[in-house]
Image (cartoon, rainbow, N blue to C red):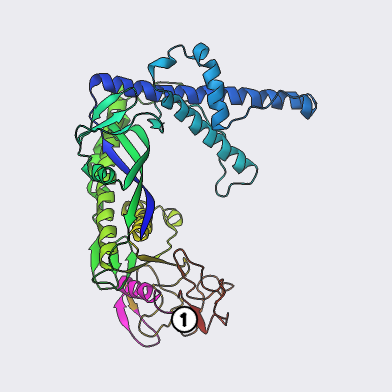
């Protein structure tokens, strides 16, 4: 049995000076088309708003502009010879990419404004600056891997561009017929050009894990992760290691002439150079962190059949200014994201414990739940049975128990901090399945002081 998934392959490029100029021109064309379409839509919206203020009937207002990607491209093709006489210098994909991005931005704004989009409210799109991120997307035309070797890619109107690394991983899939390149995105980030291919890959079902078993993963700041097997994964603290170099660069930037919005002062070239060095240093930190998380997540998926993690409120944790930098340096959300798709691709199970499940306060030996447990208490001591264990190891073992335990009878659970909160101590859910208590075979809801629901 095989499954089809979408996977991205990103390669760094080594373009020639002429190709570099062409790539910049294409990104500028994408920005120009985006700003042209936004100006057109904004002018019509402001005109209609002004006409309403004068009491003009809705039927007599200036006709509205259809901001779908198809309509914007059709309008661009009609006006491009007048507004951009140089349009033929770049691929049509660059202009279509900018208009497609504008259509998505306007659609998100409209849905957020009318209450059809959940989450934080989305503002009206703004014009793109020349110093915004350079990128454009390619979905049609001749693009993909080069047929001559595995160190070049093909881009429309740009030609064959050399890659900084080999493309053999993707090339092997294409040669076997198990991959199809759907689109490509060219971008300038982290100080160099990159191309990212969106690939439709056919994956076969993996063989059952040889070691198998279930593992609970408790993430933290002092240690990156503590496994229920007793293993501790050290936190490399990439950001703390680079703090000395980062401080020097930031002090150097503060001595340069930076931008000032009030006086409209433009930054100096030295300030821009220093900011570019700061960005490269942050890129190195990000790459090192992501590489370590990829190695950890891949190892967990290869060695265990079921992985249990917590649904952490990372955005709430970073609001603590004393812990914000340390929490952000761990990359908890990134590890969760990697485990999510890697377990799906490899036929493993990912169990996500409920956010309110007291994994640290619950005794792994007898199941009793402590009312309070300060963050400074690194050793868990049960008041009911006297069991003593490391705080993080106890939490990891409780998480591992969620994968196989349908229900757990514990002692009285006295809520800490909020006496009105009487929810059950468990309440976890299996990733991708119906949460416990909401399905057809849901367990009967009893007193929260007697029964703690876990996932089945």
Q: Position of residue 37 (x, y in %)?
A: 54, 24
Hey, which quadrant is residue 444 in on the image? bottom right
Q: Position of residue 431 (x, y in %)?
A: 44, 64
Magenta region includes residue 9: no
Asked if residue 278 is positioned above or below residue 413 in the image, the reply reads above
Depth order, front residue of 346/193: 346
Depth order, front residue of 343/420: 343
Looking at the image, the residue that sits furthest to the bottom is 385
Magenta region includes residue 387: yes
Residue drawn at (27%, 68%) of the image:
209
Q: In screen coordinates, is 129 left or right of 164? A: right
Position of the N terminus by quadrant: bottom left
Asked if residue 381 is positioned above or below residue 272 in the image, the reply reads below
**Secondary structure type for disc 1:** strand
Q: Which residue is mark 1?
A: 407
- Mark 1 Cα within 10 Å, few/some/many (few <14, many 20+)? some
Asked if residue 193 is positioned above or below residue 204 in the image, the reply reads above
Q: In screen coordinates, is 224 left or right of 68? A: left
Question: Is residue 173 at least partly visible in the picture?
Answer: yes
Residue drawn at (44%, 72%) of the image:
358
Hey, which quadrant is residue 190 in on the image? top left
Q: Position of residue 265 (x, y in %)?
A: 42, 21
Depth order, front residue of 222/448: 448
Hey, which quadrant is residue 400 in on the image? bottom left
Depth order, front residue of 366/73: 73
Position of the C terminus by quadrant: bottom left
Q: Position of residue 414 (x, y in %)?
A: 51, 79
Residue drawn at (30%, 20%) of the image:
21
Instruction: Provide the residue span drawn in magenta.
Output: 381-407
Question: Is residue 322 at least partly visible in the picture?
Answer: no
């Amino acid at each position: 049995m095989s499954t089809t998934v979408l996977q991205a392959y990103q390669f760094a490029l080594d373009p020639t000076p002429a190709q570099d100029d062409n790539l910049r021109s294409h990104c500028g064309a994408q920005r120009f088309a985006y700003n042209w379409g936004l100006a057109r839509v904004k002018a019509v919206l402001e005109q209609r708003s002004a006409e309403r203020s004068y009491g003009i009937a809705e039927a007599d207002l200036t006709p509205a502009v259809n901001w779908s990607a198809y309509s914007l491209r059709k309008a661009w093709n009609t006006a491009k010879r007048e507004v951009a006489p140089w349009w033929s210098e770049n691929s049509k994909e660059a202009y279509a990419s900018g208009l497609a991005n504008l259509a998505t931005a306007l659609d998100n704004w409209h849905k957020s404004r009318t209450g059809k989009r959940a989450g934080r409210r989305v503002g009206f799109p703004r014009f793109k600056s020349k110093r915004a991120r350079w990128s454009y997307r390619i979905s049609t035309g001749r693009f993909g891997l080069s047929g001559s070797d595995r160190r070049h890619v093909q881009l429309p109107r740009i030609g064959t561009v050399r890659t900084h690394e080999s493309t053999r991983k993707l090339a092997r899939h294409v040669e076997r017929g198990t991959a199809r390149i759907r689109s490509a995105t060219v971008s300038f980030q982290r100080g160099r050009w990159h191309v990212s291919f969106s690939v439709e890959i056919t994956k076969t079902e993996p063989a059952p894990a040889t070691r198998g078993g279930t593992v609970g993963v408790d993430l933290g700041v002092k240690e990156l992760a503590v496994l229920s097997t007793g293993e501790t994964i050290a936190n490399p603290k990439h950001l703390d290691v680079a703090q000395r170099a980062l401080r020097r660069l930031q002090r150097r930037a503060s001595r340069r002439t930076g931008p000032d919005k009030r006086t409209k002062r433009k930054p100096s070239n030295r300030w821009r150079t220093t900011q570019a060095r700061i960005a490269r240093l942050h890129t190195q930190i990000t790459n090192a962190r992501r590489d370590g998380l990829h190695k950890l997540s891949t190892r967990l998926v290869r060695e265990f059949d079921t992985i249990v993690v917590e649904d952490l409120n990372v955005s709430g944790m970073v609001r603590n200014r004393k812990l914000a930098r340390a929490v952000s340096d761990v990359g908890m959300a990134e590890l969760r994201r990697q485990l999510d798709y890697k377990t799906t691709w490899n036929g493993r199970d990912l169990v996500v414990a409920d956010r309110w499940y007291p994994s640290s306060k619950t005794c792994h030996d007898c199941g009793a739940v402590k009312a309070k447990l300060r963050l400074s208490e690194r050793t868990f001591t049960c008041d009911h049975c006297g069991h003593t264990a490391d705080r993080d190891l106890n939490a990891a073992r409780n998480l591992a128990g969620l994968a196989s335990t349908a229900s757990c009878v514990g002692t009285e659970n006295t809520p800490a901090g909020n006496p009105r909160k009487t929810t059950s101590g468990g309440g976890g859910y299996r990733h991708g399945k119906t949460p416990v208590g909401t399905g057809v075979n849901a367990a009967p809801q009893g007193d929260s002081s007697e029964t703690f629901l876990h996932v089945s």
